[in-house]
Image (spheres, rainbow, N blue to C red):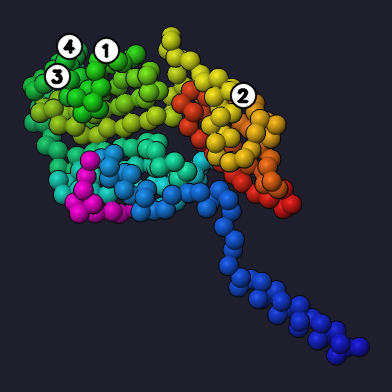
Amino acid sequence: MKRKLLTMTAGLLLTAALAGCAPTAQTGAQASYIDSEQAKAAALKAANVDAANATFSKVELERDDGMTYYEIEFTDTEGRRSSYEIDAMTGAVIEYKQSQGNAAAPAGGAQQGTQSGTAAAGIGEDEAKRIALEDAGVQEADTAYMNVRLDYDDGVQVYDVEFYVAGTYTEYDYEISAADGAILSMDFDAEGYTPQQSGSTAKTEAEIRSIALAKVPGATEKDIRLSLDRDDGRLSYEGKIIYQGMEYEFEIDAYSGAIREWEAESVFD
């Protein structure tokens, strides 16, 4: 009896070991992700930088608040450092930051008591605003909000330029040298701001249904369930599609229609 038990135990251990060596099946959601090269290409295209002129320091697949994205960082031949977040499902730019690594610092001696909104020496508010809008490719008439403020960063006099474009639900933040107009840093965020401007409207439930169902060929209205929710101040639709033995759970931005989260698994798991 003891020998029989030992034999059975050894067999079970061998089976477990072989199972552990088997490759992990890729889920339906992972299979639909773009790969790292596609994510890098999307970041380079957005930055208007040739691959031959970029040195990558980070390319990683990340997941935060139910969203999967690529975090990509690189430096171009001009010393400009760029950091991009690329949606792993769609390849869209979610957020990016750029900074001039070799931007010239303004001359010393400026006092922090300046109240006029004009730098002690260098450019003024209007020029800082023009530089930021030109870099973003945005017309001032298209902005729903604009703020230009003279500030100090580590003793350096800078202009903080912030503006919001309601048509694309996009918020921009620039830091511009008050001495020579160099862009020291910038931030673009298409998702972190909830549109509250007059005239901005959410997509209809029917439009959201169409976006979700397009991801599951063959699925129809009877296979989908939707509910409107507010998460961190942002309106979104959460839903589920059950079709041909698969269950798809998703979150879609109510304003842009961007898929913020998509998961798929067998209903038998």
Q: Is residue 48 left or right of residue 145?
A: left
Which amino acid type corresponds to the residue marked 1 in the rendered image?
Ala
Q: Of the residues tagged 4 and 1, which is closer to the observer?
A: 1
Segment tinted magenta in the rendering: 48-58
Label 1 residue SS: helix
Instruction: Read off the residue under disc 2.
Output: 228
Label 4 residue SS: loop
Upstream in sequence: badge 2 or badge 4: 4
Q: Is residue 143 left or right of residue 103?
A: right
Percent position of residue 217, x then y: 58, 41
Upstream in sequence: badge 1 or badge 3: 3
- How far, Cα to Cα, is label 2 from label 4? 46 Å
Which amino acid type corresponds to the residue marked 3 in the rendered image?
Glu
Q: Are there few (<14), some (14-19), or many (20+) residues within 10 Å of tag 1?
A: few
Question: Residue at the spot x=47%, y=43% of the render?
Answer: 89
Instruction: Read off the residue under disc 4.
Output: 116
